[in-house]
Amino acid sequence: MGAVAAAIIGAPLTMVFLVLEATGDFQVTIAVVIAVTVASTIVRILFGYSFATWRFHLRGLSIRGAHDVGWLANLTVAVLMRSDPKLVDAATPVESLRDLYPLGSTKVLFVAEEGRFIGSIDLPQLHEVKPDPQAGLTARDIAAAPDVFLLRGQNVRSALAVFNAVQRETLPVVTSSADRRVAGYLTEAYALRRYNQELELRRHAEMGMRDLFPISEPAERKSGS
């Protein structure tokens, strides 16, 4: 029972101590230690972590252990995102976009058609396009990565995996994959900083020194980022 529980839950030492407490027999405990070690090793080779953690991975929640479940589920894209995205209509001429958004005014423009996200425009890319009034280029023509976005319910670790996969610094946050209405945006730098801060807080709490290295709330988060 100890070996099976350790394989499923992923707490081998806990299972050994429970068996020892229930039986009070050190000889049995030694056998349980061996069985738990074998079971945990086999499960880790087959699934990477415990069976329960592997099931979480199949559902899209990339946790590493039971201690990740609570805080990781609460630190979502909806909590981290900024709610003031620069939205432009797909039919807006490129020349008009140049006038409205000079270099330095923002980093990324999110293009929408009938309210639905259809791509992003990096501001340097916008100003690199050679002006040609006769070409009649619009925001739709130069928008890129129409299928690259984040969802409000994604946790921070899942969001960071998307950033790493697409190699973009800023991503839009849409209401759903079907609706694709832009609710905000998130930068990789801010998501990574908040993730590291939460990890530090967990480490301090586990050591019993929560205030050893106090972490203040970022100014941009206080302002709604």
Image: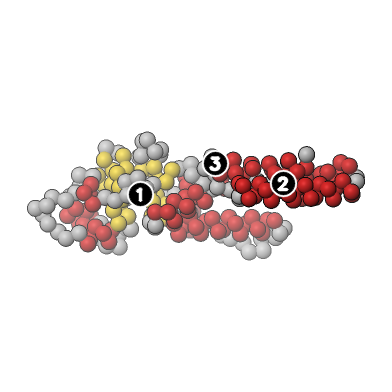
- For the point 39% across and 57% down, the residue is 167
What amino acid does circle 2 point to? Ala
Q: Which residue is mark 2?
A: 39
- For the point 20% across and 59% down, the residue is 129
**Left or right of residue 2, residue 100 in this image:** left
- For the point 26% across and 50% down, the residue is 143
User: Mark 2 or mark 1: which comes first in sequence?
Assistant: 2
Which image quarter: residue 1? Answer: top right
Q: Position of residue 202 (x, y in %)?
A: 64, 55
Q: Is residue 220 visible?
A: no
Q: Which residue is mark 3?
A: 58
In this picture, is 26 found above or below 129? above
Alpha-carbon distance for marks 2 and 3? Answer: 21 Å
What amino acid does circle 3 point to? Leu
Q: Is residue 200 visible?
A: yes
- For the point 22% across and 62% down, the residue is 128
User: Mark 3 or mark 1: which comes first in sequence?
Assistant: 3
Coloring basis for residues: secondary structure
Q: Which residue is mark 1?
A: 85
Tags 3 and 1 touching, CB below 8 Å: no
Alpha-carbon distance for marks 3 and 1? Answer: 32 Å
Q: Position of residue 207 (x, y in %)?
A: 71, 59
